[in-house]
Amino acid sequence: MTLTAEEAARFAGLLEDNSDALVATWTERVAATLRGRLSHAELQRQHSELRKAFQQALSGGAQAIGDEPAAELRAQLSDLSASRARQGFSVTETAVSVFAFKAAVLTIVDQGGGSEAALRDYVALSAFVDEAALFTSDSYVRVREELIADQAEQLLELSTPVVKLWEGVVAVPLVGTLDSARAQVVMERLLQTLVDTGSPYAIIDITGVPAVDTQVAQHVLKTVVAARLMGADCIISGIRPQIAQTIVALGIEFGDIATKASLADALRYVLGKTGQAKRLGR
Amino acid sequence: MNQQGELIQVNSDQDVVRVRQLVRTVAVAVKLSLVDQTKLVTAASELARNTLVYGGGGTVEVTTVDNGRRPGIRIVFADQGPGIVDLDLAFTDGYTTGSGLGLGLSGARRLVDEFDIVTAPGAGTSITVTKWCR
Amino acid sequence: MERVPVLKIGDILLVSIQIDMEDQTALQLQEDLADRIVATGCHGVIIDISALDIVDSFVGRTLASIASISRVLDAETVVVGMRPAVAITLVELGLQLPGIRTALNVELGMDLLARERAADDWEFDEGDAEDESEPETPAAAAP
């Protein structure tokens, strides 16, 4: 049931002739759904622009939302979904603006007498509007995904300082839950710092990590092995009692990796080793 | 949605180096992270060497791909060699019929996101690997 | 085929791999090094791989062979300058490089070799005529 050129032209006329009444009914319905979270004036502005875009698309002969004359309409719908997504509206609350348009148009058609021909036209238009609503939902989802990706990236930037503790010793205090992406960032940053500072020792402090599962342990172990391949030694510190129990219960092998209860212990251990190394070198 | 396939004949040591260089160039172009570039080039090096040593030479085709959400690189290693008789065994760490460390196939699989192998005794081997941008 | 140059500095042979090696080049390096260790009587080999953007299993195996061969010839090998991305990839690949000593850079590699020698020579240290080839640079300051 696609829209024919004549039907589209008839609706373009209808939208033009009844513009004020249409926008009013439309805004009324949407405002009821959003319960005052967007001002009446704001909605009215959005809807009159959308109405104009619908009219433009239809008078240009658009039969589907992907058609060339509907380009402006698509742009408007994308803007609408982007702003609703950013303001934290749900996908329903976003699509309702488009669906309510149908209801508003039906009211106008009814007022015009509701002849059988007019209703048939309406069904054809309805398919077009449904497409527009689907398009809106799609762009809403896309914007939300972008938002989430951005936020995840910002979190990563925040969360992983690598600090120099002593000449030749760097430390990375891990805070919060380690997922695989974050663990990878930590790992890369730590190893790069070892190279940049020429530090043969790194202390990974996990005091701030609430829980250790096999995956987290795997990541820490891989970091230690990679550091060894590069010629640096890692010490793990800040293992709390319940984490020690989990590690043993999960059967995770720390092998010959040095583990210390506190950062201070770890530093003392490293300085002991470098002191010894230095004596041997003399 | 595939574009820009580039084909390299692999018949010598030098060709393996050319495969590495091509994969590196394409990986930089689609903006893989440094670690992912390194993983992909290493996997390509292992598999191209397999094509040369075990497959008796063949072709390597590098294509950029896009799954609609993110770009990636697909590499196909094809040879007309003897094929692989026991795939499970070939994927076992440390197993080798040649003089290598036996990490080529299993290791390469861990370095990429997707790994497909089509082989039969006497019918050659074709391995397709894909790495996606994060 | 290109060849990787081997430099002699004091008691150490220094190899800095600056090219994307063909497999043959790597094997040639292995031979060259064995020859040079015998010819010079050096006791240490430093292989700088900081310019390598990948180390695959073939190069890894060659490095391991070089280390074993030099050990037989009484020279200790240290591989230095491995890039983080390379190390991460090797871990994922499952390559352990057993028997290879590593250091972050050439300087730390030389320290390591000097320490090894010192430990070896511990009991013969007194009144030894052999002078140290380079001044010590301490790896870390003592507190």
Image: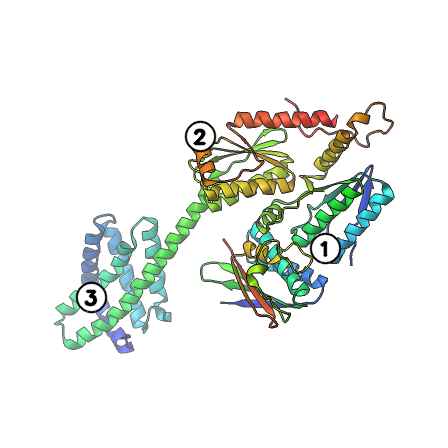
Which residue: 25% across, 75% down?
A: A7
First of labels 3, 2 by sequence position: 3
Establish if A114 lies above or below A174.
below
Confirm or deny contact between disc 3 and disc 1 (CB under 8 A): no
* Mark in front: 3 vs 1: 1
- The amino acid on which the numbered mark 1 sits, given as a three-letter code, is Met
Give the x, y percent position of residue B1: 49, 67
Give the x, y percent position of residue B51: 64, 65
Residue on which disc 2 sits: A241
Establish if C4 lies above or below A281.
below
Host chain of mark 3:
A
Q: Do labels 3 and 2 share a chain?
A: yes
Residue on which disc 1 sits: C21
User: Could you tell whether A145 is left or right of C45 in the image?
Assistant: left
Residue on which disc 3 sits: A105
Q: Is mark 2 on a helix, strand or loop?
A: helix
